[in-house]
Image (cartoon, coloured by chain):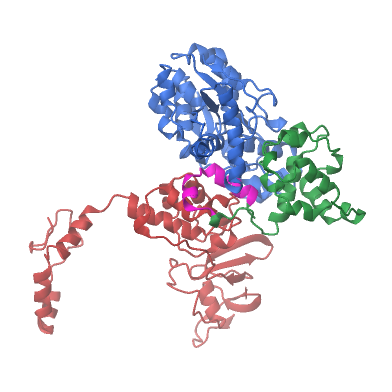
Amino acid sequence: MRVGVSSKKVCGDFAKKVKEISKEDFLLCYQCGMCSAGCPIAFAMDLPPRQVIRLLQLGLEEDIAKSKTIWLCTSCLTCSVRCPRGLDLAKVMEALRLISLRKNIDYVKPAEIPHDALAELPQIVLVSSFRKHTA
Amino acid sequence: MELSYYPGCTLKTRAKNFEDSATAFMAALGINLKEIPRWNCCGAVYSLADDDLIHQLAPVRDLIRVKEQEQGKVVVLCSLCFNTLKRANLLMRNDAEKRKTLNTFMDEEVDYNGEIEVVHLLEVLRDDIGWKTISDKLKVPLKHLKLAPYYGCALLRPQEVAIDQMERPVILHQLLQALGAEPIDFPFATKCCGSFQAVGNREGALECAWNILSSAIRRRAEALVLSCPLCDFNLAGKQEELKQKYPEFKGIPTLYFTQLLALAFGLDSKVCRFELNYQDPRPLLESKGLL
Amino acid sequence: MSNVKGNPAITTKMVPVFIMGKRYEVPESFTIMKAMEYAGFKFIRGCGCRGGICGACATVYRKPGDYKIHVGLACQTVVEPEIYLAQIPFYPANRASYRFEELKPIPEEVFKLYPELFRCVACNACTKICPMNIEVMDAVSALKQGNIKKAVELTFDCIQCGLCASRCFGELPKYHIFQLARRIYGGKILPKAEHLKAAAQAITKENRYDKTLKSLMQMNEEELRRAYLEREMEPVTATEDWRPSEKRFLLE
């Protein structure tokens, strides 16, 4: 797989935006993989958390956008509390989600949730889902 | 004695069993859990974006309601609500600029500067009431009941809000021991249940639940003990679907820790509202002679 | 001071107001609606009962030196000097379609039809913009907690003006959501008025009033006029136990 790396991307607007929203220095990550090891839903991800941070360090916005990882994150904070460099990955994941959500693009569409699901899902599930996944 | 209490939306409907059992056993200890008036939904999850203030309004408003009651602290049952309210409280205490912006924005409310404490009921039990007082009040020791305490995320992470050590917590174990039950350790006790992915990525959430349940079953637990209605939905509410997916799975009941307390205190089982539990724990409890 | 058109005897103080950005001088005692008509605007929409209850003339305005957004009904709110206003006669809000007969008297019916309810972030913009001083945020909160009764009691005065929907951060179609809650409450939760049912039965099934109606319809104008003037009316000072002397048509 060929990956195009350039300083324009590494220092570009995308990286700046993530830094602004999360206030986290993702360049701290030295790719140890503790986050991926502890992530409860990594089994369902195409790219484990560690790789997403790597792509972020390289400024590869499109590759992250193509992946489902940031949308599978449950904000459980296991990665954040275990990272040996003190990087709060959950905040980085949230920033990555918000870059898409703030363009007014829903990940979950309330109108498409079937009625029988809406009747059985307790309020806490719907509120948390809409907060994290709707624009 | 009275304690200010924040229920959260779900405890008023689907998880009324959590609330009713809690108010009942606390009353037996001489403590009235007094619901704060005019509370609103706290938002369930804490916003992790540094520049996002609008999602802090909901929890901060609730903290203002507590302040208006002139109570020094508020007790929360739902772990996720606890997590959100406590983190919002820390934000208002530690970030002067955001505090100012939020107070100025909410010009229809009194200013809030982090004056009150947010505590989880488990903390009250451990630190204010004490395990000994609880053991002394036992009428029905939960003997021979093998319970797997499931902590989830919200009680333990991040560090600033954790009510116990993050990797090897013991608070629920201690409670169960005080009640005469046998706590079962299992490796997935602090692993996320899937949370809100029950909507956005249902298959993923289902597998998270399965990992937790199957681990507890492998350790021969007879039921799981919970403190959050979202965990209850993922772990118990989805069991029928799991039975379809994994035919060898026969189901396992879940109980809120407050239901166990009400039971152990010898209160009428009606206060436990077992009919609201997704998986009926009554057959198990009856088989142990506890009902 | 200037003369009001057509009546030289009356002079009135004029104040400037800004209607959609343009300055007009209007009499200071006028309501916004009258002031706009004075300025030459003709209402074919955004005007209804002129009595503060239909919700058609919702107006948003600013005052100089004040960052706040003020709101009022144009037909009820008197102008102030230098107010800067625009009307919002209608704000779009999606209305779910449902068959009322099929709804159960439980909050989940509201959740199913309006899942957006859970997008509320308690920003309180709705309460601040409500011209009827309804505690809108509290009503949304009550519904989220499954408390239909409280939501209904809080939104009784709602005139469906749509301003809450216009400011809502979560994009909730609030006035429709509350309307659904009120319908479920009134139609399926509140006890039915049995005396009303009995009265309706008396008219439609027992035909109790058929004879009277027939005799009325057969009267000529002279007889009708006399019957009307001689009709028995409940006196203003009547007590609970007053009964008409003609007892044939009483229900009891």
* Closest to the observer, C132 or C141: C141
**Residue under the image location 53 percent in, 80 percent down:** C37
Examine the structure image and report whether residue C16 is included in the region drawn in magenta.
no
Q: Is residue A23 visible?
A: no
Left or right position of C29 against A133: left
Q: Among the chains, which one is blue? A: B
Left or right position of B269 against C167: left
Q: Among the chains, which one is red? A: C
Q: How many marks?
A: 0
The stretch in magenta equals A113-133
Q: Quadrant of residue A41?
A: top right
Left or right position of C252 against A25: left
**Residue under the image location 74 percent in, 50 percent down:** A96
Q: Among the chains, which one is green? A: A
- Vertical position of residue B103 compared to residue B157: above or below: below
Q: Is residue A65 visible?
A: yes
- Residue B174 rendering spot, x and y as whole percentages: 59, 17
* Closest to the observer, C167 or C229: C167
- Vertical position of residue C98 compared to residue C2: above or below: above
Looking at this view, name the residue that lies furthest to the bottom.
C6
Q: Quadrant of residue B265?
A: top left
* Closest to the observer, C31 or C60: C60
**Residue under the image location 58 percent in, 34 percent down:** B210
Examine the structure image and report whether residue A115 is included in the region drawn in magenta.
yes
Looking at this view, name the residue that lies furthest to the front.
B247
- Vertical position of residue B270 compared to residue B60: above or below: above
- Residue B88 rendering spot, x and y as whole percentages: 66, 39
**Residue under the image location 59 percent in, 19 percent down:** B173
- Residue C108 rendering spot, x and y as whole percentages: 44, 48
Left or right position of B211 against A27: left
- Residue B107 rendering spot, x and y as whole percentages: 63, 50
